[in-house]
Amino acid sequence: MRGMVRTNGTGRGLLALALGGLLAMAGSPHAAEAASTKVLKKIPYHPMSGASPKVKEECALATKVPEIFKASVPDLQLVDKLGGGRRLELTIRDVHAPGGGIFSGPKWVRIDGTLKSGGKTVGTFRANRNTMTGAGTCGMLHRCVSAIADDVAGWIASPTMDARLGNAK
């Protein structure tokens, strides 16, 4: 009986077949896609974010934030549309970035996020980071976003409602 799974009446053959199928699925790109958390490739600024047109254009936080998050947060998938499944909805809520780099004082970024799975909200956060160091205004803002991404990487493993991350504590 070549190619058939034999059992000795205990069902172990069926178990081996089922486990084999699960392992094969786990290695498939579709299984990874189903388990990942989706984030928009370009996230919105809140209308009252305070980000100037120049900062929006030159620092490109709307696209940089998702890219930086992907580098820090495991299993993050950047998408054009969120759709269903597990998703992290991000909004750039506040940006303080007067021009002049370190010479014009501290810079900060606040990002709000909502984690949803199966249509239900499973966690929310407000994350804020500030800095007085970095290479120019955009470098300083990117530094803030990197710190927020690290904070979110820890939070997303065990999400809570109304979490305050970074300097938002």
Image (spheres, rainbow, N blue to C red):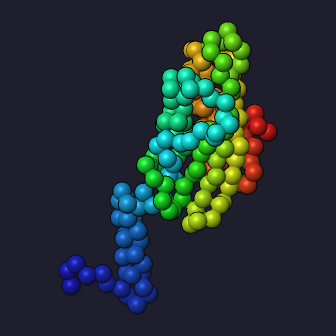
| Closer to the camera in the image, 74 or 52 | 52
Measured from the top left, where is residue 18 in percent x and y? Answer: 40, 75
Measured from the top left, where is residue 61 in percent x and y? Answer: 54, 32
* Left or right of residue 153, residue 78 in this image: left
Q: Can you name the residue that lies furthest to the top here? A: 103
Measured from the top left, where is residue 41 in percent x and y? Answer: 46, 43
Rendered residue at 71%/15% (across/down): 105
Rendered residue at 58%/50% (across/down): 89
Q: Can you name the residue that lies furthest to the right here? A: 169
Quarter that holds the N terminus? bottom left
Res 157 seen here: no
Q: Is residue 43 above or below residue 14?
A: above
Measured from the top left, where is residue 151 in percent x and y? Answer: 66, 39
| Closer to the camera in the image, 78 or 5 | 78
Res 13 seen here: yes
Rendered residue at 70%/47% (across/down): 125
